[in-house]
Image (cartoon, rainbow, N blue to C red):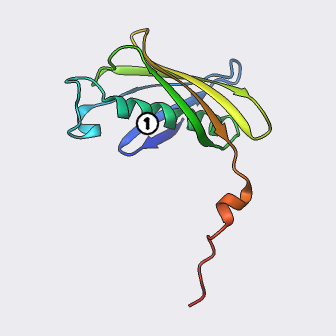
Amino acid sequence: MKCCVLGVLVIPCHRDCATGLTETKFTVQSRSIGPTRDPPNHVHGGWVAAILDHFMGMAQVRAGNAGMTGGLDIRYRRPTPLNCELKLVASLTPLTERKMQVDAELSHEGEVTASASAVFVKPRNAIFTEGTTLPAL
C-alpha cells in the first residue's frame, strides 16, 4: 500500500478499481502535529484542510493523474478528534483534459467531520522545466 506523507503524518492510500474511490484509515496523534491543539483533543482546522488537500492530490495521482490544487473548498461539520481512527474517502470526476474535480470526506465512526471539493489542474510541462537548469560554473 502506498503512503501519502504530509509533514510528519503518514497516510496510507488505497484505490479501489471497481468503485473508483480512493480511501484510507489513519490516526492523527497529538505528537504527530506538535503543540497546535486547538480546540483541545481535536485536530486544528488548518491540519484538517492540509490533510484533505494532500489526500485529494494523492487520490488523483493514484488514479494516474497529476495536478496542482486550483481551488479548494472545505466544509467543517464537527470537530475532528485526535488519537482516534479516521477515515478518508475521495471520488474523482474528470472535467477537461487538464482538470479533475476531487470530492472527499473525512469521518470518525461514520460521522463526517469535514468535507472538501477541489479542482486540480494538470500543469503544462513547461511549468516544471522552466528555470530548472542550473547555470554552468
Quarter residue 17 falls in? top right
Up/down of 53 relative to 83, above or below: below
| Residue 120, x across and y down, in percent | 64, 37
Name which residue lies at 35% across and 28% down. Answer: 45
Name the one closer to the observer, 101 or 64.
101
Name which residue lies at 24% across and 32% down. Answer: 30
In the image, 43: left or right of 49? left
Q: Quadrant of the N terminus?
A: top right
| Residue 81, x across and y down, in percent | 30, 20
Residue type highlighted by circle 1: Ala
Residue labelled with disc 1: 50
Name the one closer to the observer, 71 or 133.
71
Name the one closer to the observer, 125 or 6.
125
Quarter residue 8 falls in? top left
Q: Quadrant of the C terminus?
A: bottom right
Dot 1 falls on a residue whose secondary structure is helix
Q: Residue furthest top?
A: 110
Q: Residue furthest bottom?
A: 137
Name which residue lies at 29% across and 38% down. Answer: 32
Crowd around label 1: few <14 · some 14–19 · many ≥20 (10 Å): few
Question: In the rendered picture of this protein, how many numbered marks are placed on residues?
Answer: 1
| Residue 61, x across and y down, in percent | 63, 40
In the image, 113: left or right of 81? right
Name which residue lies at 60% across and 88% down. Answer: 136
Name the one closer to the observer, 8 or 78.
78
| Residue 76, x across and y down, in percent | 41, 19
